[in-house]
Amino acid sequence: MNTLFVIDKDSKTVLSEDLTAKLCNNFKDNGHQIETVELGKNEVSPCFGCFKCITGECVSKDAVYPIKKNVRKYDLTVFLTPVLFGHFSSVIKNAIDRGAGSHNWQVIIGYGSDIDDEEKCTFMGLTAKHRGNVDIVHPGMDRQVDVFVTRSVEDSTTICEALLNV
């Protein structure tokens, strides 16, 4: 299985680094071919809503462009994002909105050691709506989208175990 990790490089933490290492190791141990892309705020443009991607290719030739161009080769895309006021980061949002995720299976994992229960619920609810059956940006494009939040190393271990059993 070809797996792509898309990481917000401007918001790395000890928790996100631990989660990335665990996920990569677990997936590699289970036969996945891993590729990692770290995106920064100055490297990613938002979707302009021009719909050129439908009839041709994206007009933005930034760091998301090569991912989008090769997205069909990935069976799974894992997005790692800090949870900011109950939302994913603008870097990850722009990548997702531009279609940088696998059309087969996407996993979006929010992280932060200071996330309270309300913020976790907001993240889970908004992300599920944005990427799930109610997706208005790319309706019907994604077959499976799973959403998780980690607030601790223990949460990260549980997420890894859950993903290997899916």
Image (tube, rainbow, N blue to C red):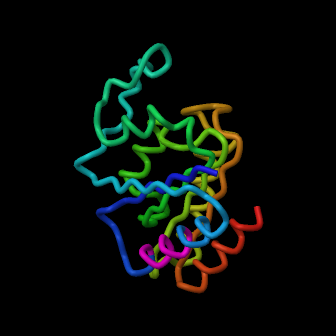
Measuring 37% from the left and 59% from the top, which residue is drawn there? 8
Q: What residue range appears in magenta?
A: 16-23
Characterize the magenta stretch by its predominant secondary structure.
Answer: helix
| Residue 159 part of the magenta-drawn span | no
Task: Please state if 124 lies on the left or on the right of 99 as rendered.
Answer: right
Nearest the eye: 165 or 123: 165
Q: 146 or 157, which lies in front? A: 157
The quarter in which the C terminus is drawn is bottom right
> Which corner quadrant of the image does residue 67 belong to?
top left
Vertical placement of residue 71 versus 151, above or below: above
Q: Is residue 19 magenta?
A: yes
Q: Looking at the image, which residue is at 41% across and 21% down?
A: 57
Residue nearest the viewer, comparing 31 with 139: 31
Position of residue 123 relative to residue 54, above or below, is below
The x, y position of residue 62, in whole percent, is: 29, 37
Residue furthest left in the image: 42
- At horizontal 67% and vertical 66% (from top left) the residue drawn is 30
The image quarter containing residue 74 is top right
Task: List x then y, in percent, for residue 91.
Answer: 36, 51
Classify residue 4 as left or right of residue 41: right
At 45% from the left and 35% from the top, the residue drawn is: 68
Rendered view: 161 above or below 9: below
Residue 76 in picture, x, y percent from top left = 61, 50
Position of 81 with respect to 1 (left or right) is left
Spot the residue most to the right: 165
Residue 129 located left or right of residue 66 = right
